[in-house]
Amino acid sequence: MLSFAPFRPLASGSLLLLVVVAAGCKPSTPASTGDAGVARDASVASAASASTAASVEAEARTLVESWVSAQNAAAFSKYEELYAPRFEGMRRSGEQVAKLDRARWMKERARMFKQKTTVSVKEITISPSHDGAEVRFVQTWSSDSYRDEGPKRMVLVRES
């Protein structure tokens, strides 16, 4: 399952922030098939690769939607479940940047979940990788006293 490194798996075999395992096979071409066999095997491998990428992209999109929904519903436990144990994050406030481990991130987020917030995302791009995906988007975050909009990058990894 994919999760963030930021997330954790939603279900076995999913991305944390996605963990989907795709097995690859080397194409085998019997000597008698010649170049036509190689071309056919390459096209099958290409189709399988595209299918895997589409699956990872769909899983990553679902994870981001769950992440947004958990925040908008003030469902801290669901939010926390999305994050991988080895998560590390960066909090930016103006010119200040702080690196946070999972425990510190969750402690800060637990405080934030005590107030009504609204989160939305747009301009989502997903780039599958060998062990997950990278997701980039523009996030809008607002509460009664604060509003911020800016780019966000999530690295999703598979965890078992």
Image (spheres, rainbow, N blue to C red):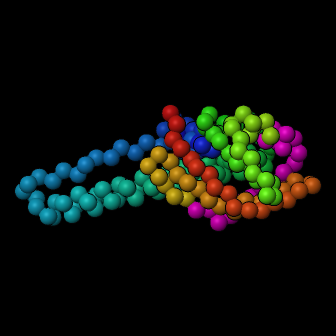
Q: Picture coordinates of residue 37 (x, y %)?
A: 16, 60
How many marks the image carries: the answer is 0
**Does the magenta-highlighted stretch encompass residue 140?**
no
**Does the magenta-highlighted stretch encompass residue 118?**
yes
Residue 79 visible from this viewpoint: no
State the residue lying farthest toward the right: 145
Q: Picture coordinates of residue 73 (x, y %)?
A: 79, 46
21 or 145: which is nearer to us?
145
156 vs 139: above or below: above
Q: Picture coordinates of residue 23 (x, y %)?
A: 36, 43
- Please give the name of the residue rendered at 79% of the width and 58% of the height, measured from the top-left corner: 95
Q: Position of 70 compared to 88: left or right?
A: right
130 or 40: which is nearer to us?
130
- Please give the name of the residue rendered at 49% of the width and 55% of the height, measured from the top-left corner: 128
159 vs 133: above or below: above
State the residue lying farthest toward the left: 32
Residue 159 visible from this viewpoint: yes
Specify start and end residues of the magenta stretch as a single range.
109-125
Q: Position of 115 compared to 24: left or right?
A: right
Q: Position of 143 compared to 105: left or right?
A: right
Please tell me in which quadrant of the rendered image residue 81 appears: top right
Please tell me in which quadrant of the rendered image residue 87 appears: top right
Q: Picture coordinates of residue 38 (x, y %)?
A: 18, 60
- Please give the name of the residue rendered at 40% of the width and 59% of the height, measured from the top-left corner: 50
- Please give the name of the residue rendered at 47% of the width and 57% of the height, measured from the top-left corner: 54
